[in-house]
Amino acid sequence: MKPIPIIFAAGAALVAAANAHAQPLPDVPIPPDGSGSGSAAPPPPQQPPDNRAIEPSSPPETPTDPYAPLPPPKPRKPLPPLFMPEVLTTPTGFLLPAAVLYSKTSIDTGGGVTSDTRVGLGDVAEFGVATTDAVRERTDENDVTVDRIQPYVTASFRLGVAENRLFLYQPGMTLGFRKSFERHHDNFATRIAELTLVASWHLGQRAAVHVGGAFWDASLEGDLDPNDNMTVRREVTFHGFNDAKQQIRPFGGIEVTPIDRSQILVDVGWAPEFCYHCMTDVDKIVLKPVLSWGVRYEVAQWMRLESGVRVPDIGEANLLDAQIFGQVTFTSWALRRAVDSLK
Amino acid sequence: MRHAFTLLVAIACSARIAAADPTVNRVLTAPTAWLPPAGAAIGTAGMDHRFDADIIVGYGFGGLASVELGTDTDVRGCTDCALRPEPLFLTRAAFRMGAHQNAWFPGMPALVLGVRTTVAPITGRDDFPSTRVTDAYAVASRVLGPVRLHAGASLIDAGFANYHMGPKLRPLGGLEWTPGQYPKTSLLADVAWVALLHADQARPEWLVGWGVRYQALPWGSIELAVRHREDEGLGDSTVLVRVNGVLNPAARSGNSPPPAGDPTLQGR
């Protein structure tokens, strides 16, 4: 027995083991080859069963750190500006961005409750379903209490080009079509349709102007001649009057932003009015000018409050029909982000 | 009326947490051009010696406008007009939009364009069914030392059943004077026109008021006033008491400084 060499050898082995234990973990993972050699040499490329060649996963000189911090999250793309598709009652030349959802709900002092839901399609179009209380009715020429027909359900489709898209200072332009479902009310059936073309310009950062034209059509069906003592239903249409000038109307509006997140809005539009028992057919369907003004307040990026005054027949300066309205608009980019995340 | 008194107390209690001074949007009857700051809620409640009450609540909209909803008894009606006309309880909403003093140029008065219209044609009376009353007005207000002047014009329209008066143009004006010795007290006087409904017609009648407002607390004030109406004797004048309050969370958090030059928003 030679105890001294044995003790020395054992001590050397313990020191070596302690030194080895004190070393940091190797950067290179030990290959699970069972050899236990700890060699950093990569395993030879293995042939897959189908004998297709694969490239080596990584060169031996670029070890990977399993404890390395995760890469920073991919930054979100900045959202494009969102301009409203309506001033207060009239359309603008701005479209909703692609996959942006829009919902507006409105109430007014006349008891009207309306809603408007839209979605932007590919930055070039927009589809929406809405209810409106702008369509009005009266019994005859002597009826001073003009009522509203509501809810009046419409569907709309608009397409267009964003501002400055084709050339500098090109206005935002949209061609829109809105059509109602047939509405049965008091034994009368009515429909409306509106084709609009509108251009919108931003004047600096704090103002925008909207100018457009509308081509209207409408129909009224029912017992339109009560004095003949016969119940004969017939239909009159706006285009049947063969007077296209009566169907075309200009409209427009302005937006001014004197305070950040607060806008002053003014617009003038048109709305059809049905007169069931007016003497002549041309008086049974007429267009009435509507003046609106109000304020839009951006509470959050996704929520806007609007309030103002709407005078349904400004041509007759009938203040009694003026309505004070309040409406809330929600916009959502959630669908847009979901679509972007799939790309 | 009991509900009105309950609401009056509720407004007075809720105004305790307000941080900004009241923004009074009228003198006594005539509107002023002061607008509440963005996000501020305002409230006014009053009652006269005949126990006719009025309550109005409002909300400052973006610093540019305000929306109000309330009930008042300014409009009266009579079927036998040899007797004193009785008040009509009208639920009305108002939208006021304008600019603060000096907003566009130095020395500019505050300007407001307002519309107040009937929400529900319920008057509590059968002799005036479907009553609708609308006022549209433009008013300018300016601080001149201890005096605040208000001047403007209003279009008044009214109708009930199948009757429609048509818009009538009338002036309006008011004066507030805060003596230097009593910085919390203001003397008030104003004149305005309101609708008076008869059995088969309607017409505007003038309404003159004078009184005093005491800014008792930073968040609230109380008014005592007398109002005289056209075609009424002095004995038929009404005496009313009214409280005003404001709730402005933005000012409490320091996010909404009061507009310069608006005395109703600055600390007294």
Image (cartoon, coloured by chain):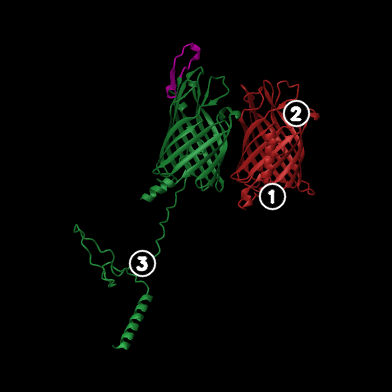
Chain colours: A green, B red
How far separated are the C-alphas under marks 3 and 2? Answer: 92 Å
Q: In the shown orientation, is residue A99 left or right of residue B80?
A: left
Give residue B100's position: percent from left, percent from top. 64, 45
How far separated are the C-alphas under marks 1 and 2? Answer: 36 Å
Query: Which quadrant of the structure image shows residue A264?
Result: top right
Q: Residue at x 36, y 81 (%)?
A: A15
Mark 3 lies on residue: A65
Q: In the shown orientation, is residue A40 left or right of residue A148?
A: left
Give residue A170's position: percent from left, percent from top. 43, 44
Q: Residue at x 43, y 37 (%)?
A: A128
Mark 2 lies on residue: B230
Res. B25 visible in picture: no
- What is the three-letter code of the residue carrying label 2? Glu
Check if residue A337 falls in the magenta segment. no
Q: Chain of mark 2?
A: B
Q: Are marks 1 and 2 in contact (CB under 8 Å)?
A: no
Q: Quadrant of the N terminus of chain A?
A: bottom left
Give residue A329's position: percent from left, percent from top. 51, 41
Check if residue A238 falls in the magenta segment. yes
Q: Residues within 10 Å of mark 1 (few under 14, many from 20)?
A: some
Q: Residues within 10 Å of mark 2 (few under 14, many from 20)?
A: few
What range is drawn magenta here? A222-241
Q: Chain of mark 1?
A: B
Q: Are marks 1 and 3 in contact (CB under 8 Å)?
A: no
Q: Residues within 10 Å of mark 3 (few under 14, many from 20)?
A: few
